[in-house]
Image: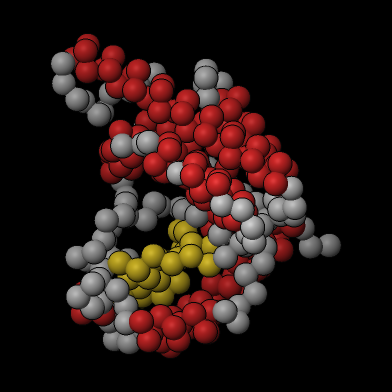
Amino acid sequence: MITLMESIQSAAQRINLAVRDIVLKHINSSFRGLIVQGSAIKGGVIPGSSDIDYVLYVDDTGLNEFGTIAAETCINLHKALSDIDVYPFRYIQFSVISSKTNKFLPPIPGSYLLLAGQLLELEATNDQIFHDAVASLDILKPEVAFNPHQLLDHGEDRIERCARLMCTVVWPVVFQFLTVIHRDGIRIWNLKKHEAVSLLANEPGVGSMAESFLRSVESYYPQEQSPEKALRLIEDGFAILNSVKSIWMVHRTRLLSRDNLINEKHILY
């Protein structure tokens, strides 16, 4: 009997192969590489919520003056990608980067799979992951990351979009917060979502909120039939974002006042 995990892995492999073939067909000689990363590789997929996340590497010559692939090529890519059944994932998501446009952290060992070509740069180190987490938490503004005015829109799939957006905001913050606590980013970013929440459980002021958020996510997906559950997910998301930001600001201040310098290599707890 096929287990759910085996079914998800089989679906991920099917989708990966289809996406790889489509990209290789439609991207010209500027193609450098293609990776898939996140829960599709490390596990912890939440059916109906988790996307399948690809990064397409191209030469700088493959992008126009605005830093994008030609619109015609993107239209043809979408036509081909739209034939792929993405279940149990919510959707396919792409980032397209070149050497000049790359603003992302390099791929984290163990959390990605190279489907074709080569990486644009070396894999991320623990130090890089740590500094990226510090920088991200420094600029975290919950009501900028998720503008609550979006909740004033109603109809079609507006509330579903809001719930999904909150998930894409919260999960990276959870992993970034764990990274600055444990100073072992490679291990942290290879955790499944359930494992990350379990590891966070004993952290005062945020652990219980992370557990509540996960319960709300699992309650809402994959049916997405209850606006009340969607709003609860969003409320729980704001709670954890605000808590993480508050805790981070306190420890940042203490670190600065104690040493009179910013030493991002100190352990915060």
In-image side of 195 versus 95 (left or right): right
- Residue situated in front as seen by the camera: 186 or 242: 242
Q: Quadrant of residue 201?
A: top right
Report the quarter where the N terminus lies. Answer: bottom right
Give me the residue at 34% from left, 19% from top: 251
Q: Position of residue 40 (x, y in %)?
A: 56, 59
Q: Position of residue 12 (x, y in %)?
A: 60, 66
Q: Quadrant of residue 138?
A: top left
In-image side of 33 versus 229 (left or right): left
Q: Quadrant of residue 145?
A: top left
In-image side of 158 versus 253 (left or right): right
Whether residue 73 is visible, yes or no, is: yes
- When the figure is inspected, residue 92 is found, relative to residue 131, above or below; the finding is below
Name of the residue lying farthest toward the right: 1
Give me the residue at 38% from left, 85% from top: 73
Give me the residue at 37% from left, 31% from top: 180
Name of the residue lying farthest toward the left: 260
- When the figure is inspected, residue 108 is found, relative to residue 144, above or below; the finding is below
Report the quarter where the C terminus lies. Answer: top left
Q: Position of residue 13 (x, y in %)?
A: 59, 70
- Residue situated in front as seen by the camera: 92 or 115: 92
- Residue situated in front as seen by the camera: 202 or 163: 163
Give me the residue at 74% from left, 48% from top: 226
In-image side of 21 versus 47 (left or right): left
Q: Position of residue 181 (x, y in %)?
A: 40, 27
Question: How many numbered marks does the figure carry?
Answer: 0
Whether residue 126 is visible, yes or no, is: no
